[in-house]
Every structure is written in structure tokens, then in C-alpha cells.
Image (cartoon, rainbow, N blue to C red):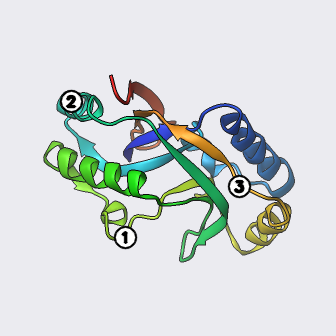
Amino acid sequence: MHGLVTLLPDPFYEQVEAIWDRLEQRCGLNGIRVTPYPHFSWNIAEHYDFERLEDLVRQLSTDIAPFPASTAGLGLFTGENPVVYMVVVRNEALSGLHKQLWQTVAGACDDLSLLYAPEVWVPHISLAYEDVDRENLRQAMSELAFETYNWRFVVDHIAFIRESEGQVGELKWKIPLGR
């Protein structure tokens, strides 16, 4: 699965990597390493027209100024394959850019995940997925639940991670906003 993302800035990038390390060492969770870049996703799809996608994002990004974003606590996507994540708080600028990206890139991809559609999108920073089960979920939540995750940062780019089946994701490009 490939995706349009925003990478976290320092020091939060390193802090998420440290959380991943702790969850791996203390809970045996390392499935997150398939996408080894701390980020939140705007959308994901099975197939993108890679060149067209980059051109579309480049055109869109020139008219979007960087804007503030924040996190607030932890969340859990439940189901057969649970995901532990940090909540990225939706604000007007975040929701607006997300909607523009959704509309702009829809024609440049196949199988765009409907979990990222504007009306249902939950912006988040994944902390554990792929190998979360009943036992290590308890351990992970116990490890993380007593910390505060109220971060503030600036969304200043859109990036693309290409993640072919069975391969570790690779950062292909990063386009600044407002240029």
C-alpha cells in the first residue's frame, strides 16, 4: 500500500521512533517497521500513477501555506488487526487540505482506501500495527497510557511513501507547501 503523508518534524520524529523502539523491546511489536517513517497519512491506495500524482501534488501545494497541527492522546482502531495510534487533532486547515488532496488525486490512483475519505478520515500517527494481538496490546497500552501526547507542530509538506507488497516502505519525494 502506498501513501501520501506528512512526516513529523524534529523532535517528534525521534520521539515516535523511540516509542517504536520501546514497544519492540518491551512488547515484541515491530510490525510498524514496514513503514519506517514517523508520519500521518492523507490517503493510501494500492496503485498510483506515480508521475501524475507528483505533478498534481506539486501544483496543489503551491497555493497552500504551512499551518499548525497538534496531537492529543492515544487511540485504538479495533477489529481483527488493531492499530495503536496517537491522535492528530482535526482542525479547519487539516480537514481542508485533506479534502483538496482527496479530490485532486482521485483520478491518479486505483483502489483509494475509503477509510481515508474526507467524511470518515481519522488523522493519526501509527505506533503499532500488523502484529498487535490481545497480549501485546495490553502491554503496549500499559506502556503508553500514562504519558502525555500533546504535541504542536507545523504541517509544511506532503510526501509520498511507496510500499510495494512485502517490501519496506521507501520515501520517494517530499514537496513543501507554499512554494
Q: Residue at x 46, y 28 (%)?
A: 171
N-terminal of the two: label 1 or label 3? 1
Q: Amino acid at mark 3?
A: Asn
Counting from the top left corner in percent of width and height, residue 11 is at: 71, 33
Counting from the top left corner in percent of width and height, residue 119 is at: 32, 70
Pointer 3 local density, CA inside 10 Å: few below 14, some 14–19, many at least 20:
some
For the residue labelled by badge 3, is the local secondary structure a helix, a strand or a loop? Answer: loop
N-terminal of the two: label 1 or label 2? 2
Q: Residue at x 80, y 61 (%)?
A: 144
Pointer 1 local density, CA inside 10 Å: few below 14, some 14–19, many at least 20:
few
Q: Residue at x 30, y 49 (%)?
A: 46
Q: Is residue 45 visible?
A: yes
The residue mark sitting in front, 1 or 3, is 3
Q: CA distance from mark 3 to mark 2?
A: 32 Å
Q: Amino acid at mark 2?
A: Gln
Q: Which residue is mark 3?
A: 150
Q: Amino acid at mark 1?
A: Val
Left or right of 143? Residue 36 is left
Pointer 2 local density, CA inside 10 Å: few below 14, some 14–19, many at least 20:
some
Q: Which residue is mark 2?
A: 59
The C terminus: image quadrant? top left
The number of callouts visible is 3
Q: Is residue 14 above or below residue 148?
A: above
Q: Which residue is mark 1?
A: 120
Q: Is residue 161 above or below residue 122?
A: above
Whether residues under marks 3 and 2 lie with C-beta atoms below 8 angstroms apart, the answer is no
Say which of 14 and 49 sits in front. 14
For the residue labelled by badge 1, is the local secondary structure a helix, a strand or a loop? Answer: loop
Counting from the top left corner in percent of width and height, residue 164 is at: 39, 39
Whether residues under marks 1 and 2 lie with C-beta atoms below 8 angstroms apart, the answer is no
Q: CA distance from mark 1 to mark 2?
A: 26 Å
Say which of 162 and 71 sits in front. 71
